[in-house]
Amino acid sequence: MTDRVDTPEATCTPEELRRYARQLILPGFGLEGQRRLKEAKVLVIGAGGLGSPVLLYLASVGVGTIGIIDDDTVEVSNLHRQIIHSTSSVGEAKTRSAARRLTELNPLVTVVEHQHRLNVDTAIELFSQYDLVLDGADSFATRYLVSDAAEVTGRRVVWGSLVRFGGQVTVFAPGSGPGLRDIYPEPPEPGEVPSCAEGGVIPSLCGIIGSTMANEAIKILTGIGDTLLGRVMLLDAASFQWTTLRLEASPDTDPRRHLEPDYEVFCGITPDDGASAEQPIEMLTANQLAHVLDRPAGPVLVDVREPKEIELGRIPGALSIPLGDLSERAGELAPDDEIVVYCQSGVRSERAVRQLRQLGFSHVSHLDEGFQSWLAARQPMSHR
């Protein structure tokens, strides 16, 4: 019996040879590297700021199967940094928008849409369908779930995060180095680490960090180069200084054998006892809020955004109390007041409603989709 010799035609189709020609000639890459990419199945958590460049480069390089999990829809405020989406995608599911763009970019890859939120009931089964996971999530609850599910299933994770002008990237491999729980043994307090919606982010940083994540994935899948396993790469985009730090697995970190029952509870994000699922949070549309504010005895309007956000515009008459200061400054409000809370998109204001209920305020609602919906409805705004 003679050994099998793969010809280019046996490994790549003529179309693939043309499409991937510039990477096929790289030293150490060749047909074997392309074959590994073609056979790989990669799951990307989130089709947002980091997920966008990650997905685009994974598709362009020829990763055979790309899964996208995201339960969100495209908003106008996403477009400055989530470059996989376009204006025509506003209102559409991010998974659908991203899948369409990837298919346009490279019809040779298979894109699988998972249009739901990652949860403890499905994470293990989902991760088992893929070879590698890239985590671009914007919440610690999801990050811990990804990390634990990857450890239980033995999947490697390329992890990235960013806020404002800072970003970081590393690689986790179960049993072969440190993991997320070595970096964060305990989850940060709610609000301690702002999300992009809360702290802002420079859009080009999403491209830099996302491209770095995609590069790590390509190295892992092809076996080329040294990955960031055991190291975390930090970028300060304001000064454009890169720093690489060594990571060590803590001897006190036990291997994960199962998932937490509830990752939001684990991260301290808990609904208050008096505002359980049986008592839904009341929301007002922009037009409804405008009507309510016109009443002679209107509600107290509270803006829980950060001062930098408020500089760009606010609803006239609103009291500014950033979400992180709400518990401390709740004394500025009367328990019997009718209160309407708003933020930029509706996420923080919902959390503010829960906080106020915990503190004894019972007449609290919030503006659905936040200040951006107020602008979309062409309601009056102030810069003071």
Image (cartoon, grey):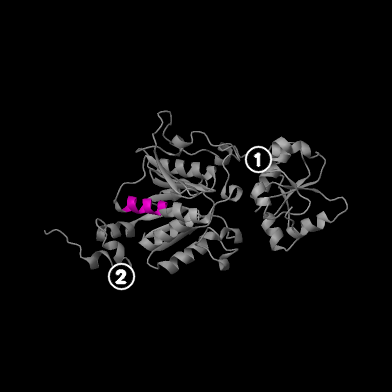
Which residue position is annotated with label 2? 18
Observer-nearest of 288 and 168? 168
Residue 42 image position (x, y, % from top left): 40, 54
The kind of secondary structure element at disc 1 is helix
Residue closer to the observer: 190 or 1: 190
Does residue 48 appear in the picture of this structure? no
Question: In the orientation shown, which residue stands out farthest toward the left?
Answer: 1
Q: Residue at x 41, y 41 (%)?
A: 151
* Residue 209 pos. (x, y %): 45, 51
Indicate whether residue 129 is drawn in magenta: no
Label 2, secondary structure: give it: helix
Q: Is residue 217 magenta?
A: yes
Q: Position of residue 326 (x, y in %)?
A: 70, 39
In 3D space, how far apart are the residues under numbered discs 2 and 1 (Cα atoms)? 54 Å
Between label 2 and label 1, give the one nearer the viewer: 1
Q: Main secondary structure of the magenta part?
A: helix
Which residue is farthest front?
239
**Disc number for residue 108:** none
Horizontal side of 263 relative to 285 (left or right) equals: left
Quadrant assignment, res 250: top left
Give amino acid for label 2: Arg
The residue singled out by tag 1 in the image is 324
**Residue stretch in magenta:** 212-221
The residue that appears at 60% across and 50% down in the rendered structure is 197
191 left or right of 175? Answer: right
**How many discs appear?**
2
Give the residue drawn at x 26%, y 62%: 25
Q: Amino acid at mark 1?
A: Gly
First along the sequence among labels 2 and 1: 2
Q: Position of residue 270 (x, y in %)?
A: 63, 39
